[in-house]
Image: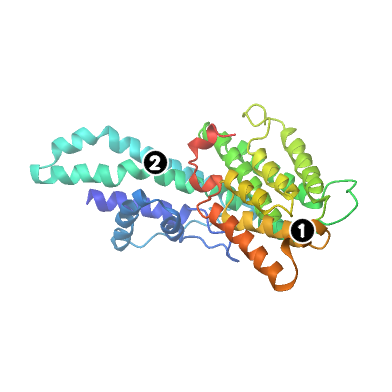
């Protein structure tokens, strides 16, 4: 029964306290196992199967009304989720402390079962904890509306803006609220997790800024300058938050991720080979983001650049050439992944 009891506790914590998928319209309590199944590495699948097998042991209990997991005002119960996850780590420490005693108390035929409990379950709890923590920035700092706003802004203006765009203030305010929430949880959130979660949230912001910029369709010569004004204003505002330097967040980490992408809008539209080479040199942007940038540069400048028109020709020949260039770019980036897709939480502590 030890295996079933341990698996049940893990199931309870993972299913109820894994942060929800914010791409859906309604935030549901529970269902965290489905998210972990979709996002978990292969090494995690055995642990998840053990946890699912524990579901018939007993029905999952109803949460007390004091655990506000569905309210954005309470950051979807961030505090309760942290306590639940850290309880997992405490359970692991207890299990490791009594490991020898369990082996000695077990009859010989059960010795292999004790070993498998540790190999298949206990040793993977740290990984489960990291997977759950990695979801926090996505629920605490919503960016889907920002991405949509950026995608529909007028970026081909001939006049340079006198001030930054409105979405910059919104992002700064949301990050500040998250920063303050983590500060209020310092009594029960491990000290090493606060800067890691802050870094994860900054990477989340930067990746979503790139996502928004990759979706625009009408660009002009001032487009990268307008974007640069926005991100530099955001960088300065975030760095001025008291405590950022203490956590090693000044200069702002991951800023180059969005800065390098913006520079891609300076690519010469009449030089397909340069665009393909740029794609090869930037493997940390997903394929759809690079293709979005290249297509925007090609389409927006084709109406204004005579050399581009001469290169691409007219009518069907132009369309064929554009498709050929996009196909080359797509081949160059087909294995690309964003930084957060391949970076563990603890790797965030060192990444810039």
> Quadrant of the image for the C terminus?
top right
Quick one: which residue is furthest to the left in this view? Answer: 108
- Locate residue 95, reporting x and y percent: 29, 38
How was the colour assigned to the protein in this rendering? rainbow
Quick one: which residue is furthest to the top in this view? Answer: 246
Which residue is at a point 72% across and 33% down the rendered structure image? 239
Which residue is at a point 81% across and 48% down the rendered structure image? 226
* Residue placed most toward the observer, 140 or 245: 245
| Side of 161 where 319 appears, left or right | left
Within 10 angstroms of label 2, few (less than 14), some, or many (20 or more) residues?
some
Please tell me in which quadrant of the rendered image residue 254 appears. Answer: top right
Within 10 angstroms of label 1, few (less than 14), some, or many (20 or more) residues?
some
Q: CA distance from mark 2 to mark 1?
A: 54 Å
Q: Tell me: residue 301, above or below residue 250.
A: below
Q: Are marks 2 and 1 in contact (CB under 8 Å)?
A: no
| The label number, if any, that marks residue 111 in the structure image | none
Local SS, label 1: helix
Please state which of the two labelled residues, at mark 2 or mark 1, is closer to the viewer: 1
- Locate residue 170, reporting x and y percent: 75, 50
Which residue is at a point 35% across and 40% down the rendered structure image? 91
Mark nearer the N terminus (2 vs 1): 2
| Side of 224 where 112 appears, left or right | left
Residue 113 in sight in this render: yes
Q: Tell me: residue 228, above or below residue 251.
A: below
Label total for image: 2
User: Label 1 belongs to which residue?
Assistant: 308
* Residue placed most toward the observer, 49 or 82: 49
User: Label 2 belongs to which residue?
Assistant: 126
Local SS, label 2: helix
Residue 216 in sight in this render: no
């Amino acid at each position: 029964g030890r295996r079933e009891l341990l698996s049940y506790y893990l199931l309870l914590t993972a299913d109820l306290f894994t942060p929800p998928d914010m791409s859906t319209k309604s935030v549901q309590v529970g269902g965290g196992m489905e998210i972990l199944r979709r996002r978990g590495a292969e090494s995690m699948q055995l642990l998840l199967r053990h946890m699912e097998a524990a579901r018939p042991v007993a029905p999952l209990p109803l949460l007390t009304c004091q655990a506000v997991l569905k309210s954005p005002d309470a950051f979807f119960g961030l505090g309760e989720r942290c306590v639940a996850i850290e309880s997992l780590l405490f359970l692991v420490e207890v299990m490791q402390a009594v490991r020898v005693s369990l082996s000695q108390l077990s009859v010989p035929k059960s010795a292999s079962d004790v070993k498998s409990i540790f190999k298949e379950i206990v040793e993977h709890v740290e990984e489960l904890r990291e997977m759950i923590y990695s979801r926090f920035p996505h629920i605490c700092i919503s960016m889907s509306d920002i991405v949509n706003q950026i995608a529909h802004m007028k970026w081909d203006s001939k006049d340079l803006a006198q001030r930054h765009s409105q979405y910059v203030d919104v992002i700064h305010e949301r990050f500040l609220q998250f920063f303050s929430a983590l500060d209020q949880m310092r009594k029960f959130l491990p000290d090493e997790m606060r800067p890691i979660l802050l870094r994860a949230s900054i990477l989340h912001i930067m990746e979503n800024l790139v996502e928004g910029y990759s979706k625009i369709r009408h660009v002009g010569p001032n487009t990268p300058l307008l974007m640069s004004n926005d991100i530099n204003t955001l960088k300065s505002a975030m760095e001025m938050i008291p405590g950022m330097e203490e956590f090693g967040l000044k200069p702002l980490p991951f800023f180059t991720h969005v800065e390098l992408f913006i520079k891609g809008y300076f690519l010469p539209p009449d030089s397909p080979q340069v665009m393909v080479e740029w794609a090869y040199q930037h493997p940390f942007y997903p394929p759809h983001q690079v293709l979005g940038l290249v297509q925007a540069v090609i389409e927006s400048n084709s109406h204004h650049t005579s050399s581009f028109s001469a290169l691409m020709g007219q009518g069907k020949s132009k369309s064929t050439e554009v498709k050929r260039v996009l196909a080359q770019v797509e081949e160059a980036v087909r294995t690309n992944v964003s930084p957060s897709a391949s970076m563990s939480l603890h790797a965030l502590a060192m990444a810039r």
